[in-house]
Amino acid sequence: MITGDHLLTRPISHPRAFVANPWVFGGALAMAFLQLVFTYHPAMNRIFGTVPIHPGYWIYPILCGLGVALAVEVEKWLRRKRKSKAPPAQDRVSQ
């Protein structure tokens, strides 16, 4: 797994909270750059018959992403809180 899902339990303030593989950030930045090229470069607009969107409209996907990140952080916080309140599991002796 590229992102290392086992890290999803760490709080966002943890230094390696997002991914176990630091190359993922480089890949994400490269994809964002390519998206901007496909969206705004005139040659790409001619090839695909598209029109660039107004930069102000980027606020909607950014706000949605921040909302999802907030929801994930709240869920992780609730899971940690519930786990800390749970009674310790008793060892079972196999028969």
Image (tube, helix red, strand yellow):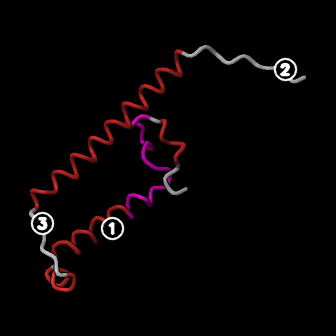
Look at label 1 and name its amino acid. Answer: Ala
Residue 43 within the segment the image draws in magenta = no
User: How far, Cα to Cα, is label 2 from label 3?
Assistant: 64 Å
Image quarter for residue 56? bottom left
Crowding around mark 3 (Cα neighbors within 10 Å: few <14, some 14 to 19, many 20+) is: few
Disc number lying in front (3 or 1): 3
Establish if 1 lies above or below 30.
above
The N terminus: image quadrant: bottom right
The prevailing secondary structure element of the residues shown in magenta is: loop
Spatial distance from mark 3 to mark 1, Cα to Cα?
A: 20 Å
Amino acid type at mark 2 = Val
Outermost residue, right side: 95
- Tell me the SS state at disc 2: loop
Q: Secondary structure at mark 3?
A: loop
Magenta residues, start to end: 11-27
Residue 5: x and y, percent? 52, 46
Q: Secondary structure at mark 1?
A: helix
Question: Residue shown at 16%/85% (left/top)?
Answer: 46
> Label 2, label 1: how many angstroms apart (C-alpha)?
53 Å
Please report the residue visible at 22 percent of the width from the left and 52 percent of the height from the top: 61
**Mark toward the start of the polypeptide (3 vs 1):** 1
Q: Residue at x 49, y 20 (%)?
A: 82
In the drawing, does residue 16 fall left or right of residue 51? right
- Tell me if 69 is positioned left or right of 19 in this view: left
Q: Which mark is residue 30?
A: 1
The residue that mark 2 highlights is: 93
Earlier-in-chain disc, 2 versus 1:
1
Q: Residues within 10 Å of mark 2 (few under 14, many from 20)?
A: few
Residue at position x 33%, y 41% in the image? 69
User: Is residue 25 highlighted in magenta?
Assistant: yes
Question: How many C-alpha atoms fall within 10 Å of the one at disc 1: few (<14), some, or many (≥20)?
Answer: few
Instruction: Determine which residue is flagged by label 3.
Output: 53
